[in-house]
């Protein structure tokens, strides 16, 4: 539900804020809803607030499943 | 764009589509409802239905907070904004939503109301801080994704000691809406609408987790697959639903594992619980009164509740009697079935909730799906002609 | 003693002064403003002659005339300002007819209290843009209105040009089979402007693509003017509006390929942030050309060889379609309609 985009943390700022970027476009947003944010982390951003961290392993797992589906189909 | 482009790969899509084709039992049809308006938009914008076999169809659900906002709430917001001391802050989505008599926030702005479009509640707070002589009201809408940002705005307002900031709360809840649909006579008893499963919302689920859907899967015996926002996420979820239906399973599965967990964002949930409570009932445009489907500010935050602070009245409002939105939101009818569709009711002149926002079923069909109707009608006409020629 | 001293000549305080109502009243103050700012920035023989109107010899053939008002907000944005837009935009309207732009006029409606320094900046960049394009601003007008009656400044420019013999571009000229060519990446201008709008601020290096296109058009005309059906610059409403307009006026449909449309990654990212579709976002230095199929290759090559057309691409074709739909094959492989929005696209949360 609702438009949210994956952004990367460039810089952690005081008061639970962070500078995040998506392909060269950056914005300052609130990370008050997510714990332990570090530069390099990917966050789900919605209306100026991070709602969750993107788990890189799970992301890769999803892509693997998608690719496997493709391979399996070819077999 | 990382975590976006990979999930939009058209070549992988074709392979998944082939798998769906192979898995779908030709002897039956599959109808899946994508609850979330963002999913409706993704399906339309990428032409996803073109890749599905004809016996796998999507039904567009009511997960669009703009669409289900009753006209009366827009009227109330406009009336508030017309007061000279009020600065009304709103997300862009609401600017053109029509109120009664062809009014809208955009038109009210033209008439002199101080209405400001913002990207985030953080911007509204900045305005309140910068302009202490203004009464800043934030027009809060949205499902569970958008509620924590409103809760945090309240927390920040209190922390900063702002005395000129308040919320006009119209937040609604996803499980209540799903329940409303599944319990409607058309779906539950009459079997008019065959909903074989749900695509669960992406970002609502990052907040509430997958756990709340267990009840629906159990009680109504329908599979739920929570899907990410990108088209590959959606098409993978459809494949997972087809498998569940074929296997006779009705489980909650999570396709959006990179962002959604079983219990969701408990910090966000706690913030919301801190500031909001359930309304016993709230009118949803197209669905009528929905019990325990919406939120209001807790009584101890009355100072920040615009409805109390400014004694706001929500006028009763009626949708056009010929409007089929209620049926369309439940999946009983399709946009083209409604008499008003495309004639009186267009995106320029929306009569009901389904046409109001770009992801309502009727708006999506108008913008992205109309040409398919024409193509099909064209084919049918040609087939008829061919048939005549042979006969 | 009665010594006639030379009257003190007041200088305009460009650095710190503000425009006031006397600057629009037709008296000495207005003359001073016009001279110190506009004549200085635009300087040419016509303005030096100091007439209310400017005369020029008329070339044989057909002429075009166009006018546009510029009300952009904010006035200054990455890659340009209201002044450069006013010069480029009107030159482009002339160029879209395949014509060679000759002269411009510029009218200013200025709000009382507007800083002279800002007005000067705008005028100087207009002068620069005009000189770079080789199209002088030969006449103009200045009015000042009360505080609150204009958003800083409104500019209106008109232009005249001459159409080369044999060229007759018309909005109803598109035919099924014609190629659709776009001269470069879409959405740059709209995103650059939005990035500076209050309450939507985000940081980006995207610059407005505002540019005068008559040079590019000239090379296209040389490469195959007889094959060009029509050209249009996709400003407000983006290429979605432009293609829908042409479809409607020519009674055709379009089929375009999303993968073929040039789009800068940063523009794509900014659109993701705000929930915008790049197809609906304004451009100020791009053109859409509908070209007969036999001329497409040569014209495309000519465009790609020009500095303003390096990313030019063939994005689709006109087709028979009684409904006039503009359809697009998405990068995902499905189909969708590219619709004509009724108002400005607004950022969304859903």
Image (tube, helix red, strand yellow):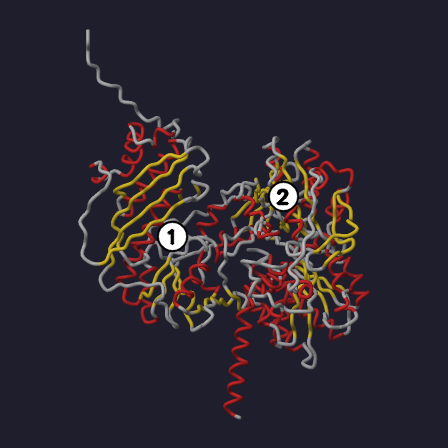
Position of residue B387 in the picture relative to residue B329 (left or right): left
Residue at 45% across, 64% down: C260
Quadrant in which the C terminus of chain C is drawn: bottom right
Q: Nearer the viewer, mark 1 or mark 2?
A: 2
Q: How many marks?
A: 2
Disc number placed over residue B318 in the picture, else none: none
Q: What is the secondary structure assignment of the residue under circle 2? A: helix
Coordinates of residue C175 in the picture (x, y in percent): 37, 71
The chain containing the residue under callout 2 comes to B
The chain containing the residue under callout 1 comes to C
Residue at 28% across, 65% down: C224
Is B168 or B77 nearer to us in this picture?
B77
Q: Residue lying farthest bottom?
A: B391
Query: Residue under circle 1?
Result: C285
Q: Mark 1 Cα within 10 Å, few/some/many (few <14, many 20+)?
A: many
Compute the Cα span from label 1 to label 2: 42 Å
Query: Residue under circle 2?
Result: B79
Residue at 29% across, 48% down: C133
Looking at the image, residue C172 lies above or below residue B376: above
Looking at the image, residue C180 lies above or below residue C126: below
């Amino acid at each position: 539900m609702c438009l949210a985009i994956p952004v990367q943390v460039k810089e952690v700022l005081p008061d639970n804020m962070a500078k995040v970027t998506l392909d060269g476009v950056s914005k300052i947003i609130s990370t008050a809803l997510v714990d332990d944010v570090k530069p390099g982390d990917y966050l789900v951003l919605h209306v100026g607030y991070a709602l969750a961290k993107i788990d890189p392993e799970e992301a890769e797992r999803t892509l693997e499943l998608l690719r496997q589906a493709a391979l399996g189909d070819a077999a | 764009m990382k975590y976006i482009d990979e999930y939009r790969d058209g070549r992988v899509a074709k392979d998944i589509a082939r798998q769906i084709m192979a898995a779908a039992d030709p002897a039956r049809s599959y109808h899946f409802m994508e609850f979330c308006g963002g999913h409706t938009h993704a399906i339309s914008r990428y032409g996803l239905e073109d890749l599905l076999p004809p016996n796998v169809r999507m039904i567009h659900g009511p997960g669009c907070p703009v669409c289900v906002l009753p006209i009366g709430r827009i009227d109330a917001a406009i009336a508030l904004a017309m007061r000279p001391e009020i600065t009304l802050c709103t997300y862009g989505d609401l600017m053109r939503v029509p109120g009664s008599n062809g009014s809208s926030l955009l038109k009210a702005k033209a008439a002199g109301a101080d209405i400001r479009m913002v990207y985030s509640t953080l911007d509204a707070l900045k305005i309140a801080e910068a302009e202490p002589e203004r009464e800043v009201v934030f027009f809060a809408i949205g499902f569970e994704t958008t509620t924590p940002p409103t809760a945090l705005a309240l927390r920040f307002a209190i922390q900063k000691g702002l005395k000129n900031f308040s919320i006009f709360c119209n937040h609604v809840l996803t499980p209540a809406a799903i329940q409303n649909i599944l319990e409607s006579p058309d779906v539950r008893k009459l079997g008019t609408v065959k909903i074989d499963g749900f695509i669960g919302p992406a970002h609502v689920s990052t907040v509430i987790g997958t756990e709340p859907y267990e009840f629906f899967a159990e009680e109504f015996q329908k599979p739920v697959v929570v899907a990410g926002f990108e088209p590959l996420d959606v098409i993978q979820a459809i494949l997972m639903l087809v498998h569940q239906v074929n296997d006779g399973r009705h489980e909650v599965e999570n396709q959006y594992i990179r962002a959604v967990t079983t219990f969701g964002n408990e910090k966000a949930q706690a913030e919301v619980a801190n500031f909001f409570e359930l309304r016993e009932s709230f009118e949803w445009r197209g669905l009528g009164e929905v019990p325990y489907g919406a939120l209001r500010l807790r009584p101890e935050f009355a100072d920040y509740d615009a409805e109390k602070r400014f004694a706001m009245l929500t006028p009763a409002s009626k949708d056009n009697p010929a409007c089929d939105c209620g049926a369309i939101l439940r999946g009983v009818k399709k946009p083209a079935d409604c008499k008003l569709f495309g004639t009186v009711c267009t995106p320029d002149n929306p009569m009901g909730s389904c046409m109001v926002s770009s992801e309502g079923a009727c708006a999506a069909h108008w913008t992205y799906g109309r040409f398919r109707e024409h193509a099909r009608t064209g084919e049918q006409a040609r087939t008829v002609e061919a048939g005549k020629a042979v006969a | 003693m009665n010594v006639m001293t030379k009257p003190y000549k007041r200088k305009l305080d460009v650095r710190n002064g503000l425009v006031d109502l006397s600057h629009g009243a037709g008296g000495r103050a207005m003359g001073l403003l016009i001279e110190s700012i506009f004549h200085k920035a635009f300087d040419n023989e016509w303005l030096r002659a100091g007439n209310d109107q400017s005369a020029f010899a008329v070339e044989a053939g057909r002429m075009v005339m166009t006018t546009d008002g510029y009300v952009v907000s904010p006035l200054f944005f990455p890659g340009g300002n209201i002044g450069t837009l006013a010069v480029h935009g009107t030159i482009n309207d002339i160029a879209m007819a395949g014509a060679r732009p000759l002269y411009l006029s510029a009218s200013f409606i200025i709000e009382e209290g507007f800083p002279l320094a800002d007005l000067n900046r705008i005028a100087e960049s207009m002068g620069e843009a005009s000189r770079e394009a080789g199209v002088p601003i030969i006449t103009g007008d200045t009015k000042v209105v009360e505080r609150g009656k204009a958003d800083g400044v409104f500019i209106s420019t008109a232009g005249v040009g001459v159409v080369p013999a044999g060229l007759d571009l018309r909005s109803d000229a598109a035919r099924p089979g014609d190629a659709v060519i776009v001269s470069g990446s879409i959405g740059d201008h709209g995103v650059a402007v939005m990035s500076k709008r209050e309450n939507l601020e985000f940081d980006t290096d995207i610059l407005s693509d505002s540019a005068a296109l008559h040079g590019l058009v000239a090379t296209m005309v040389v490469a195959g003017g007889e094959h060009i059906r029509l050209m249009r610059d996709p400003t407000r409403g983006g290429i979605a509006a432009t293609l829908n307009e042409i479809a409607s006026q020519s009674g055709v449909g379009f089929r375009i390929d999303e993968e073929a449309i040039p789009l800068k990654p940063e523009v794509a990212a900014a659109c993701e942030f705000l929930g915008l579709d790049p197809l609906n976002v304004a451009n100020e230095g791009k053109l859409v050309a509908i070209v007969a199929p036999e001329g497409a290759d040569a014209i495309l090559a000519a465009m790609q060889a020009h500095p303003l057309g390096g990313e030019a691409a063939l994005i689709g074709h006109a087709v028979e379609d009684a409904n006039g739909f503009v359809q697009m094959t998405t990068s995902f492989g499905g189909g969708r309609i590219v619709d004509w929005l009724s108002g400005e696209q607004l950022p969304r949360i859903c």
